[in-house]
Amino acid sequence: MSNQFTEMGPGSAGATPVSIADPGPLGLAGFAMTTFMLSLVNNGVIHGAGAVDFVPLALAYGGGAQLLAGMWEFRKGNTFGATAFSSYGAFWIAVFIQAKFFPTGIAYNGWSYFLLAWTIFTFYMLIASMRTSGAVFAVFLALTVTFAILCAGSFNGSTYTTEAGGNVGIVTAILAWYASFAVVTNSTFKKTVIPVFPLSK
């Protein structure tokens, strides 16, 4: 089963196949679960001391598993998957560091600009995702909207905006879980069981 993150751009033709398992489902699953948990914090379902309970998950699964998935995507010669998983793995490691060592927040509104930077990165990855699959494109579209709303909420200090961002983040997590489920299921059954909606090349 081909990798739904497969790069279709120049330089991919004639590449020697690498016989390792597809790291895409792992990376998507790690992203989905940590996004789901943080979104429950952002929309207020998890609050108070319980808000830090997901922090080890952010380091181990969101950070560690995704970073590993990104390195394996490099091994497969997949620029898009390598860039996406390595970057969002680093994002979750940064979230862990911020929550663990700077629990009272970052001075000078730094978190707002942190979210702005990730909004910009996610937007250009959204453009690149147009050459992957409909399932992956939907993840990046929802994630771009999530970051944009959270960024706006952080800049204007609006709890309601942040809660809205948390709600969209839950949608993002569900879409990422779907994409992971589809790829791992199709790979296991060695046929298309769950559609990923290939985009026209």
Image: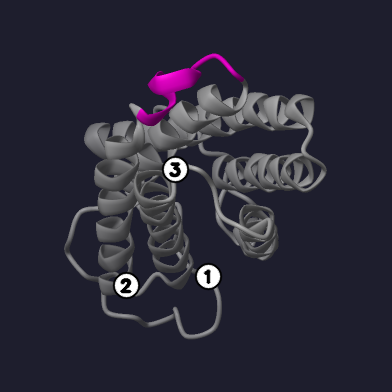
What's the CA distance linking mark 3 and mark 1? 42 Å
Looking at the rendered image, the quarter that the C terminus falls into is: bottom right
Left or right: residue 4 compared with residue 97: right
Choose top left, top right, bottom left or bottom right for residue 110.
bottom right
Residue 151 placement (x, y as % from top left): 72, 48
Looking at numbered disc 3 in the image, what kind of residue is underneath it?
A: Pro
- Is residue 23 visible in the rendered image? The answer is no
Amino acid type, residue under disc 1 in the picture: Met
The residue beneath circle 3 is 103
Q: Position of residue 187 (x, y in %)?
A: 28, 40
Is 39 above or below relative to 99? above
Which element type, helix, strand or loop, lies under badge 2? helix
Kindly identify the residue that appears in the image at 33 percent across and 51 percent down: 63
Q: Answer with mark 2 or mark 3, whichever residue precedes in sequence.
A: 2
Circle 1 sits in a helix, a strand or a loop, which is it? loop
Residue extent of the magenta highlight: 44-52
Q: In the rendering, at what x and y percent does residue 54 appear?
A: 35, 30
Residue 51 within the segment the image draws in magenta? yes
Residue highlighted by disc 2: 74
